[in-house]
Image: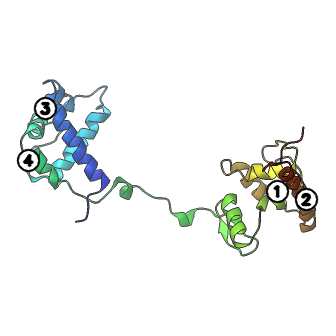
Amino acid sequence: MGAPSMDAMLVVARLKYARRLFTKAPPALPALLGSKWLGKRMPWTTQLVDDLHMARKLIPRCAGLGDPSESTEAWVSWIKGPHVENDLRAIRFCESLLDRAVQPDTACISKRFPCSDCGDAFSTAKALASHRRCKHGVRSEWRYFIRSSTCPSCQRDFKLRVRCLNHLGDRRRPACADFVMKNCQRLPDKEVLRLDTIDAEQRLLARKAGRTQVLTPL
């Protein structure tokens, strides 16, 4: 068997902590293992009972101790006894809770954004833009869909088209970019070239003024 999983190490650590707790605790504390509030156990007792069930499954000495939620005295005696440290070495498993969780099938994720150059499809507009920038040298996919300074999705007027493009390129807020890619009509290449020329002039003026971004006009 390989190294124990993080889950196994956490079970051991919690049981060692429970040993220290019960060794120094008042006599009433062990009774809490079987107590309930409004028909439910408290979260920490639920976790401890689950860990004791794991000990019952993996530690031979614990196999005959009974249900931890019912045979509380037997389990408290074991956890306070002299053999616990050695017994806990038997808790070794490689499985993790993450292994038991159902993971999404990436093949089933809808890829609604195809590349017009090579046909590859992507699940988000951001992923498509990254692909086209790296593989096809396209600077900004939204250049082909934005004519004015107003975002078609949120209707905010950025005063300049170049600033609207910066807004759509903000990876923290992909909703507007996805909306544009799905709902806006592609502009003619000649019109895109004309608009890009205006944007380039505005960027050049910003650099000459010592700025890295084009400011919104007053």
Q: Is the Cβ of the residue at disc 2 closer than 8 Å to that at disc 3?
A: no
Q: Secondary structure at mark 4?
A: loop
Q: Which residue is mark 4?
A: 64
As drawn, is 31 to the left or to the right of 156? left
**Which of marks 3 and 2 precedes in the sequence?**
3
The percent coordinates of residue 81 (x first, y second) are 7, 39
Q: Say what amino acid the circle numbered 2 marks.
A: Leu
The percent coordinates of residue 178 (x first, y second) are 72, 54
> Going by the picture, which residue comes out furthest to the bottom?
118
Label 4 environment density (alpha carbons within 10 Å; few <14, some 14–19, many ≥20): few
Residue at mark 2 to residue at mark 1: CA–CA distance: 17 Å
**Which of marks 3 and 4 precedes in the sequence?**
3
**Which of marks 4 and 2 precedes in the sequence?**
4
Label 3 environment density (alpha carbons within 10 Å; few <14, some 14–19, many ≥20): some
Q: Say what amino acid the circle numbered 1 marks.
A: Cys
Q: Which residue is mark 2?
A: 195
**Which of marks 4 and 1 precedes in the sequence?**
4
Q: Which residue is mark 1?
A: 184
Please say whether residue 143 is visible from this viewpoint. yes
Q: Nearer the viewer, mark 4 or mark 3?
A: 3
Q: Is the Cβ of the residue at disc 1 closer than 8 Å to that at disc 3?
A: no
Q: Relative to the observer, which residue lies in front, 11 or 50? A: 11
Q: Which mark is residue 23?
A: 3
Question: Which residue is found at the position 87% from the left and 58% from the top?
Answer: 200
Q: Relative to the observer, which residue lies in front, 122 or 38? A: 122
The percent coordinates of residue 54 (x first, y second) are 21, 49
Q: Secondary structure at mark 3?
A: helix
